[in-house]
Amino acid sequence: ISAAWGLGESVVGGTVSTDDHVVDRTSWAVVSRHVADKTEMTVPVDGGTAQRPVPAGRRRGPVLDDAAAVALARLGVRVEEHFGAPQDVEWAREGDTFHIVQSRPVTALPEPTGDVPTTWPVPYPGGLFFRASIVEQLPDPLTPLFADLIDGSVARSLGALMAEVMGEDVLAPGDVGMPTVNGYAYHHYRPAVFRRILRRTPAAAAALFGRDARARATAGGVTGWRERSRPRYRAALAARSGTDPATLSPAELLAAVEELLDAGTVYYTAVQSVIPQAVTSELAFRAFHDRVVRRPGEPDGVGFLLGLDSEPLRAERSLYDLATSAARDPALAAVLSGAEPAALLRALRDGTVPEGAEPAAWEAWAGRWRRHLGHYGHTVYNLDFAEPVPADDPAPLLDAVRFHLGGGGTDPRERQRRTARRREARTRAVRARLGPVRRAVFDRLLRAAQEIGPVREDALAEMGLAWPVMRRMLRELGRRLVGAGVLADPDEVFWLTRDEVRRAVAGERPDVAAAIAGRRAQWRGRRRAVPPQVLPESGLVHRLIRPWLPAVDRAPAGPVLSGVAAGTGSVTAPARVLDGPADFPAMRPGEVLVARITTPAWTPLFARAAAVVTDVGGPLSHGSVVAREYGIPAVLGTGSATSRIRTGQDVRVDGDAGTVTLLDGPAGGDTGGGDTAGGDGPGDGGGPDAGGTRVLLAATAAVGVAVTAACLRSRRGARGGRRSDP
């Protein structure tokens, strides 16, 4: 039951927040109730209706009490029994009397949804729980099997990295991990870890930046990623890629998945040593340019870092080439543009020729398609392996090809060439006016930023290399459990716990059907929450670390959302809220892309977007980097955009101020994130608003200049002044 004050047309139209009740039709008990912050209501006026503020005393008050909800539920069941099918019933209440206004058959029943969390109890006392780093690519609650496996994998990986850099005894068992709170992944560090790290930091820094840095470079950084981490990850994958999952026993399938997940986690931990270099190098260059070199009226330093190549942009070019190659054959283009996408995907999967296609031309194009999937099909939308990757479900990629084939978007090569020409022209003009000392600093900082930035994108794009193989093995394991009568569908394996999988592999037959249904409903409820970025939600550490993390903690009640200013310019356009890759075909050119995150797998949508808004992300996240390449505004890390904005709603995205303004009426449903008095709206110094972000970036940049200078000095001393891989 959805309920709001005022007339019902605003509920049907989705323009107001609603209270939501779930009533058990057997026991007639209210099993869950969510009371929204109802800011506006539709009321009758002369000649029609109008939106008016809800009186303050009613905003947080329930529209229906439990007795009224049960009475209305009984009416709904009577209507259903009358028509002989589930019904979507519109109703009104005047005084104590309900009126049934309209009833229509339900064509798609909503899936059961659990309660939205309102408290965030930590699983262990003491320590710090925060969402950053790998968690940026885990925006949703985790599925049970991934949650069980990733916690131990992250603890082992972080332990190995810290032991290598700071000594074997820097960590004790249980010091670090990735537990979940209400299903959301959090990094966890015990207090003693920070004390031990602080004691070891001077020695570790000397090791990393000292004269013998060359010998230790393989511990991390760009060189370590290229020479050790990446080859090791590829080797671990190669050892398993040629294995037919059907030849492995259930126990061997589970062991192989755990082995590959460990390899991926170790790889990602190594990538964490690339990211600080990328952050430091960009912020150092931009701070130097904007404070020392830039003249009034000139653009900021971002333009010097555009037009550079990276793996996501190479994937985009490959998709564009698939479209242009098909366009050269009118018959092939007609088939790709006109046939049903499902039929084309079946033909590509099964190796058949769709109706109307010439076999030789189709097979040549299908070969290029398979090569694209082989090279780029591992890019993840979400690191939880329950989420399909493009290699499993290439429908979004086919949609991108059809978009370009229809004339949409621009040639990515030409866009990159234009950007590079502007960048080089600006570089020549600036260098010509600088003296020798400032020119030397400008050159060094720019070279480091231009070389390291794209490497970060390359490293992140390869995080999912093992994901297609892991998913094949897990789905094979799921098929075995279906055959054994444990599961009803292979994909239910993702909703088992590790203990349940091991028991089933050992020959037990646990009754898990009800548990799986309950976990899915609970996951859907939890997904409506806005997870705090730091737990506990108070204290000095919370205040110090919160502004550095990749999302706002709470949803503001007003029409303005704040986040990280990540792409310059301002635009007003309708929003398109995308839940995941299945929604990609709904995106129309000129709409504002609103999503929880945008990983490299989301890049094809940027060609259509007027702007980008995300719940999670920072100034150097993938969404920021690609938005700058496309020259579109971006506001990232709002914390609640996907729950506050509705599809079709006009929004103004200001990529310079870091704000998103909701223009045509109130936002969508309240997420249960709580009130925001004293919270994170514009002007609140505690949150990552536009002004606060600029201050933080300036402070970070100052540190970055010093660190980069130290790096450059150490390279000069260790390598005879020759520039090598930074």
Image (spheres, rainbow, N blue to C red):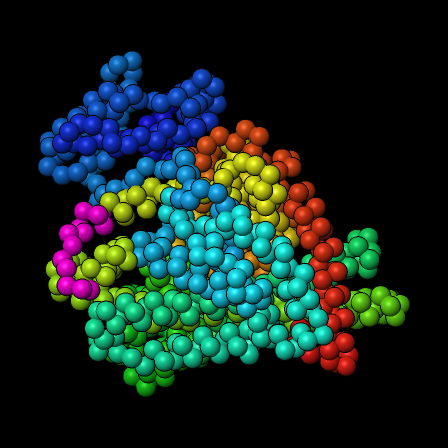
Residue 514 sits inside the magenta stretch: yes
Residue placed at 50% from the left, 45% from the top?
127
The quadrant in which residue 448 appears is bottom right
Q: Which residue is more in the foreground, 257 or 426?
A: 257
Point out the stretch of residues depicted in magenta.
Answer: 505-517
The quadrant in which residue 162 appears is bottom right
Most distant residue in the front direction: 169
Q: Is residue 547 visible?
A: yes
Place of residue 626 in the rendered image (x, y in percent of width and height, measured from the top left): 56, 61
Q: Is residue 395 left or right of residue 225?
A: left
Q: Which residue is more in the foreground, 675 or 40?
A: 675
Most distant residue in the top direction: 95
> The C terminus is located in which quarter?
bottom right
Q: Is residue 683 left or right of residue 592?
A: right
Q: Which residue is more in the foreground, 436 or 175?
A: 175
Place of residue 499 in the rendered image (x, y in percent of width and height, measured from the top left): 25, 57
Residue placed at 39% from the left, 49% from the top?
180
> The N terminus is located in which quarter?
top left
Q: Is residue 344 left or right of residue 328?
A: left
* Figure check: 162 above or below 362: above
Q: Is residue 294 left or right of residue 529?
A: right
Residue placed at 21% from the left, 78% from the top?
247
Place of residue 185 in the rendered image (x, y in percent of width and height, measured from the top left): 42, 51
Residue placed at 23% from the left, 56% from the top?
500
Residue 711 sits inside the magenta stretch: no
